Amino acid sequence: MTHPNKNLFQVAILVFFLSLFFYQNREQVYSEVEQSSYENLYTYSDFIDDEIEPYCNGVDYEEIENLNIPNLSKVNINFINKAAWYENYFNAFTNDLDIIYDKYKKRFDASVEFYFENGTVCEFKAKIRISGDYKDHLRSDLSASLDVSLEEGNIENIVKFKLFLPETRRMNTEFVTSEIIRSLGFLTPRTYKLNASVNGQEEVEYIFQEKAVKEFIEFNQLRESTILETSEEYFWEKRQEINSSVVPLYGKILNTNWTNLSEFNQKISIQALSDFNKLVFQSDGSYLIYDVKKEEYDQIRKFDAAIYALDGNHGLAIHNRKFYYDNYDKSLIPIYYDIDSQIATRDLTFPKCNEELKYSYQMTSCINNLSAAASEILNVIDFDSMQIFQNLNLKNVDVSKEFVDKIFNKFILNLNQISQMGQNNFKFSENSI
């Protein structure tokens, strides 16, 4: 029979030695506990739904500012299902009409690799589709203009952008004209030149241009609001469904996700859409006509005068217009888009408004009093062709100084001629649709 006092004595001795051991090794024990807790902190992070992934595999913060488009050496685009991409491309390229049907503009999963000059490589998942209305956006060598939407990551905080084949935007002319419009203070998407390879094919030179989306608005330090464009639903492939020579044009909200965030946003968007539709419906079907006596159209008038002076009437056509809605001033702010300037290759004529006017853009320029707007622009220009040239150099856009001088000087000459055109009166209906 075991004596109870003996058992208690043994337990007491065991507790004493254990206590002595922990006391003598307390620093090591605490250190191990802290290390274990630290490791568990990161182990459990795998289960946090809203964990923020590090940018570009955790590249150092100091290096991020150098990961911009001018410092790109190349871009690789690889489609996950290459066979499906090329089948869709072939069908688009071989269809009967010169336009690209919407059914060929479905998005495909892809990865986009950005290679920077410092050796950093960033790879992001993306969804990509064919971009463009006409087949000039498709080449026989399987190259195409692309609409890219990054599913993760960004490049200069841009997540949605276009890669245009250079011939679809008159390459160097696009760089100079977009930089002139930006220097005038108008909303202009960031535009660069870069080389990209698709599915391991030979590299192709592209015009990189960001899209008018949330990040574009934020970059221009504007409060997020409605972004509008003209719906082209019946302008292209559905045109044959209309038994009329007049194509119905009307506004379309681009950022519907923002619109549906709240009832307040919906009210703003409805008002923006209403204002834009009123502008479209009171016009002549080709170009916007607006009441120059109303202050809310001042920005549009100056923008249109500048685009007209750059021989970018393509971008003034109603179906090519894009706007940001300023809810504070209750006004539509024009966004530079697809002006297709021909200023480098031809000379426009600017007849006086009391003379015979042959073209719609001449008539609307007289109704909209672009003459006064051109004079206002001439009075506020505070840059010259050298500054435009230097700005393009900072973007690594290789354009000759002579080419920049040619476009800038013609721009100033055209503004002077437009300023002398005069104005024609126009009676607006108060009962527009």
Image (cartoon, rainbow, N blue to C red):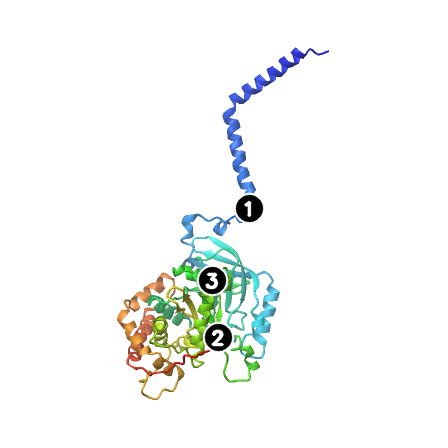
Residue 418, quarter of the rendered image: bottom left
Residue at 30%, 77% (x, y): give it: 372
Of the two numbered discs 1 and 2 on the same chain, state the one appearing first in sequence: 1
Mark 3: few, some, or many residues within 10 Å (few <14, many ≥20)?
A: some
Residue at 53%, 27% (x, y): give it: 29
Percent across and percent down for residue 342 are 39, 77
Type of amino acid at the residue the image marks with label 3? Asn
Type of amino acid at the residue the image marks with label 1? Ile
Compared to residue 353, the image places residue 209 above or below, namely above
C-alpha span from label 3 to label 1: 31 Å
Q: Which residue is mark 2?
A: 250
Q: Which residue is mark 3?
A: 265
Compared to residue 418, the image places residue 197 above or below, namely above
Nearest the viewer among 324 and 103 is 324
Q: Is residue 347 visible?
A: no
Percent across and percent down for residue 116 are 45, 56
Single out the mark in the foreground, 3 or 2. Answer: 3
